[in-house]
Image (spheres, rainbow, N blue to C red):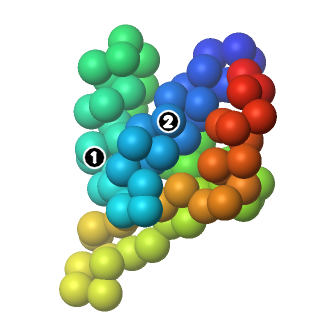
Amino acid sequence: MEDSILIRRAILMQLEAAFPASLPLRTLLLGLRLSGFELGSDELSAHIAYLEEKGMVLKRKSPISAAHVRVKLRAAGLDYLDEGEV
C-alpha cells in the first residue's frame, strides 16, 4: 500500500514539473523507472485511473491517434502536493 502512495506522489510530482503542459504515459513510466520504481504500463495505467477518479489528473487521448495518451495535473493534484501529504 505504501508503495502505491509513493508511486502516485511521484507521478504527481512529475506532472507538477511539467505543469501547465501534459506528459505522455511513456514519459511518466520512464521517469518512474529512473526514480527506482519497477512497474509496467498496466500498473501505471491503474495508478493514473485512480488519480483521475480522485480528480487530481486529467487523461486525454490525442485527436490524431487514440494510441497517444497524455496526462495533465489538475488543481486538486496541485493542492494535494501543496499540502505536503504523503
Mark 2 element type: helix
67 or 48, nearer to the observer: 48
The residue that appears at 76% across and 27% down in the rendered structure is 85
Q: Quadrant of the N terminus?
A: top right
Q: Does residue 40 appear to the left or right of 49 in the view shown?
A: left
Q: Looking at the rendering, which quadrant does residue 5 occupy?
A: top right
83 or 32, nearer to the observer: 83
* Mark 1 neighbour class, 10 Å CA radius: few under 14, some 14 to 19, many 20 or more: some
The residue that appears at 27% across and 44% down in the rendered structure is 27
Q: Does residue 71 appear to the left or right of 48 in the view shown?
A: left
Q: Disc 2 marks which residue?
A: 13
Mark closest to the chain's N terminus, 1 or 2:
2
Specify the amino acid type for callout 2: Met
Specify the amino acid type for callout 1: Arg
* Mark 2 neighbour class, 10 Å CA radius: few under 14, some 14 to 19, many 20 or more: some
Query: Across the whole image, how many numbered discs are drawn on residues?
Result: 2
Q: Does residue 10 appear to the left or right of 62 in the view shown?
A: right
Mark 1 element type: helix
* Residue 10, percent from left and from top: 51, 29
Residue 27: tell me if it is visible: yes
Residue 26, numbered label: 1
